[in-house]
Amino acid sequence: MSERVETLNKARERMIEDRDAFAKVLAAPFDRDKAERARNRFIEIQTLIDAIDRAIAGDKG
């Protein structure tokens, strides 16, 4: 595996950890402010994870 793919995989893992933290907020008892912020950040991070996945696939192909 190339160094670039390893770096992307590490970045992906870090983003998954961040996303999971926001998922916990979303799963907690409802608080409108916290839920709205968590939802927005969750979507941003998931979009980033998807972009990292595409970069990994492009590097392997």
Image (cartoon, grey):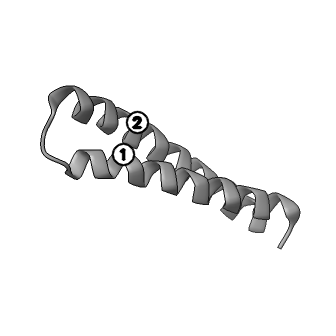
User: Which residue is pictured at 16% across the width and 29% down the height?
Assistant: 32
Front tag of 1 and 2? 1
- 25, 46: nearer the viewer: 25
Residue 44 picture location, percent across and down: 45, 37
Between the residue at mark 1 and the residue at mark 2, the CA separation in whole angstroms equals 7 Å
Q: Secondary structure at mark 1?
A: helix
**Image quarter (top left, top right, bottom left or bottom right) of the N terminus:** bottom right
In the rendered structure, find residue 49 and report the number of the disc placed on it: none
Quadrant the C terminus occupies: bottom right
Query: Splitting the image into 4 quarters, where does residue 8 fall?
Result: bottom right
Label 2, residues with CA under 10 Å away: few <14, some 14-19, many ≥20: some
Circle 2: residue type: Arg
* Label located before the other in sequence (1 or 2): 1
Q: Residue at x 12, y 40 (%)?
A: 30
Residue in the image at 39% along x and 41% along y: 43
Q: Position of residue 59 (x, y in %)?
A: 77, 61
Q: In the shown orientation, is residue 27 left or right of residue 1? A: left
| Residue named by callout 2 | 41
| Type of amino acid under label 1 | Phe
Q: Specify the farthest residue to the left.
A: 30
In depth, the one of 45 and 58 nearer the eye is 45
| CB within 8 Å, label 1 to label 2 | yes
State the residue position of label 1.
Answer: 22
Q: Visible in this render: residue 29?
A: yes
Picture coordinates of residue 20, whole percent (x, y): 40, 55
Image spot of residue 15 (x, y percent): 55, 50
**Residue at the spot 69% in from the left edge and 59% down from the top edge:** 10
Report the side of 38 relative to 49 (left or right): left
What is the secondary structure assignment of the residue under circle 2?
A: helix
